[in-house]
Image (cartoon, grey):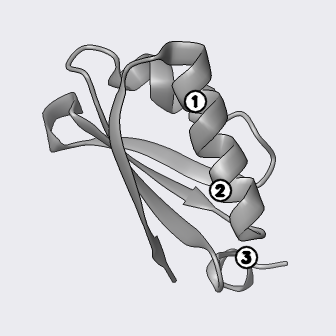
């Protein structure tokens, strides 16, 4: 499967985090196999995570990142 085929139908999660915690949370969010990338943006206050798969996968990812790190401020998503 090419990169283009993989990203069609994916969801971009925008996760705002406490200052100084973005790298830790991005590394944690990038571990599941259905995550294509987790990039720190906005000076380390937000992470953009590209997730393939069903909405349930997105929800589990947000919940697990919140639970492991406890520093998420808010999350939102955009379907590609």
Task: Report helix, strand or loop for mark 1.
Answer: helix
The reply to whether residue 15 is in sight is: no
Residue 29 location, quadrant:
top right
Horizontal relation, residue 6 to residue 67: left or right: right
Pointer 1 or 2: first along the chain:
2
Circle 1 sits on which residue?
65
Relative to 40, does residue 51 appear above or below in the rendering?
below
Specify the label residue 58 is tagged with: 2
11 or 74: nearer the viewer: 74
Real-space CA distance between mark 1 and mark 2, rounded to the nearest whole angstrom = 11 Å
Of tags 3 and 1, the one toward the viewer is: 1
Circle 3 sits on which residue?
6
Percent position (x, y) of residue 48?
Answer: 40, 52
The reply to whether residue 44 is in sight is: yes
49 or 18: nearer the viewer: 18
Real-space CA distance between mark 3 and mark 2, rounded to the nearest whole angstrom = 15 Å
Q: Dot 1, crowdedness within 10 Å: few (<14), some or many (≥20)?
A: many
Specify the label residue 18 is tagged with: none
């Amino acid at each position: 499967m090419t990169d283009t085929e993989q990203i069609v139908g994916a969801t971009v999660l925008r996760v705002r985090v406490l200052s100084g915690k973005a790298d830790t949370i991005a590394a944690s969010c990038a571990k599941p196999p259905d995550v294509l990338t987790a990039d720190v943006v906005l000076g380390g206050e937000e992470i953009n995570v590209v997730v393939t798969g069903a909405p349930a996968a997105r929800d589990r990812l947000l919940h697990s990142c919140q639970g492991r790190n406890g520093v998420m401020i808010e999350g939102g998503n955009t379907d590609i």
